[in-house]
Amino acid sequence: MKISIVGTGYVGLVTGICLAELGHNVLCIDSDKNKISQLKKGISPIIEKGINLALKKTISSNNISFSNELSLACNFSDVIFIAVGTPTKSDSNDADLSILNHVLSEIKNYANRTKVIVIKSTVPIGTNDHLSKLYPKESSNLVFISNPEFLREGNALFDARNPDRIVIGGVDENSIKKVKSIYRRFKNKKIIVTDPTSSELIKYASNAFLASKISFVNEIASIALKVNASISDITYGMGLDPRIGNLFLKPGPGYGGSCFPKDVKAIDFFAKEKNLHLPIISNIEVSNLIIKKKILERIKMVLGKKSKVKNKIITIFGVSFKPDTDDVRESASVFLIKNLTKLGLRIKLYDPILSDTNQIPFKNSEWYSSAYDAVLKSQLLIIMNDSREFLNLKLKNIASSMQRKRIMDLRNLFNVDDLSQAGFEEVYNLDKDIVT
Ligand code: UDX
C-alpha cells in the first residue's frame, strides 16, 4: 500500500522504515530541509541501532522516499500517518498541538477524496474525537484513526518490528480495516481495535504506569539505603511474582526522556482539567523530582562543605537519559549538571554515544571522548546511565587517575567488591555507603 508519513522524528522515521520493510511504498515528509536532504542520502538524523543500514536497504528497494512538500502527502496516498511532535506547552502541562493543527489544516486543502489520517503522535485524551468534529468527513474528506506508538528510544527499530500490541482506535469501519491491513504482515501481532479515546488513553495509561513503577522502585530504594538492605535482592524477589513482573523494576536517578515526563504531565493536566482528584497520577512527577533532589543532596553530603567544593572537579559518566541514545531531554544527568555547577564545581562529562560532534554545552562542564581522561584529578565519579560500555572499563586505571577515589553508582551497575578491589576507597550506590 502507498503510505505518507508526516514527521521524521523517532516515531515517524522508524515507522516509515518499518512499513517500507513490510513491503509498503512509503513517502516520509518533514519541513526540516536539512533532515530530508540527509535522509535522501541514507543518513539518519537520529541515533538508533541498525537504522542507517535499514534506511539504505529500504531506499535501494525503492520502498521509501523523502520530501519537504506537505502537499505531496495527499497526492501520494490515501493513508497519511501523522507523527509530529506534541511537546509540553511552555506555560502549562498541556500538550502543544500547534504543529499537528498546522499539518492538518494544510492536508485538508489537498484532500480531494477520502484520506485516512492515522494519528501516531501522542495526543491528549479526546483529540481524535475533537478532530473528527472539527473536520467532518463530509466537508473535509478526512477520517481520523488513533494508532499510538509504544517504541523505546535506543530500541526503536526492534520495537517497531516486533510490536507487542497494535492499537487501532476509530469509528469508521473501512478506515479501521485499511489500517489493520497495513499491519497484517507482522508476525505474532496482537491488534486491539477500540474507540479513539480508549486508544489514546491506552498510551497515556501505559506510560504513566511504567513511570510510576519506576518511581515506586526508586522510593523502595530510598528505604533500602536507609536500612542497608539490598535493592537488587528486593526487586528480584518482587519480580518473581508474575503479577508484578521483573521488567521496569530497575532503580536509578529518576526517569527521563521525551515521553514519560511529557505524558505524565499531560495525563495529570487532563485529570485536573476534569476536576478529578487522582493522587497517584498527580504524584508521579513529584516523586521523580524528589528522587533527583535526594541524589543531589547525597552528592553534596559526600563532597562536604560548600566552601570546599568551589573549582573542584567531579566526573559524570552517562549524560543521555538512557544508553544507546543521544537524547538528553529531561535526563537526570542534566538536572545534576545544572545544580552542581551552581555550587562552583567543575564537571567532566563522558558519554559513550554523545561524542565530540554533538557535545551539548553546559556551564563549567567539559566533554571528554575518553572515560580515562574524564576522571583525571576528579574528586568523585558519578555513574548516571546503565550503558554496558562502562562495564568494560579498567576500573583500576579509573580509580588510580582520580584525586579522591570515590564513586557513586546510581544504577548499581558495578559489583561493590570489584570497585573496592579496583582501589575505590569510598563506594556509594543505590543501597550502600561504603567508606574504607
Ligand atoms: C518510553 C516507553 O518505554 C515507550 O513504550 C514509549 O513509547 C516512550 O517512552 P523511552 O522514553 O524510550 O520509552 O525509554 P525507556 O526505556 O522506557 O526509559 C525511560 C526512563 O526510565 C529512562 O530514564 C530509564 O533510565 C528509566 N528506567 C527505565 C528506569 O529508571 N528503570 C527501569 O527499570 C526502566
Image: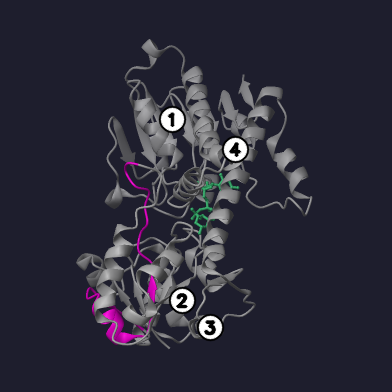
Mark drawn on residue 173: 3
Dot 4 or dot 1, earlier in sequence? 4
Q: Which one is in front, 250 or 399?
A: 250
Classify mark 3: helix, strand or loop. Answer: helix
Classify mark 2: helix, strand or loop. Answer: helix
| Mark 2 Cα-neighbour bin, 10 Å: few <14, some 14–19, many ≥20 | many
| Residue 412 shows in this picture | no
Report which residue position mark 2 lands on.
18
Q: Is mark 1 within 8 Å of ligand 1?
A: no
Q: Is mark 2 within 8 Å of ligand 1?
A: no
Rounded to the nearest whole Å, what is the CA distance between mark 4 and mark 3? 38 Å
Are discs 2 and 4 less than 8 Å apart at CB? no
Classify mark 4: helix, strand or loop. Answer: helix
| Magenta region, residue range | 64-91
Q: Which one is in front, 61 or 183?
A: 183
Residue type marked 2:
Cys
Report which residue position mark 4 lands on.
279
Dot 2 or dot 1, earlier in sequence? 2
Report which residue position mark 1 lands on.
401
| Residue 224 shows in this picture | yes
Quarter in which the N terminus is drawn: bottom left
Are discs 4 and 1 less than 8 Å apart at CB? no
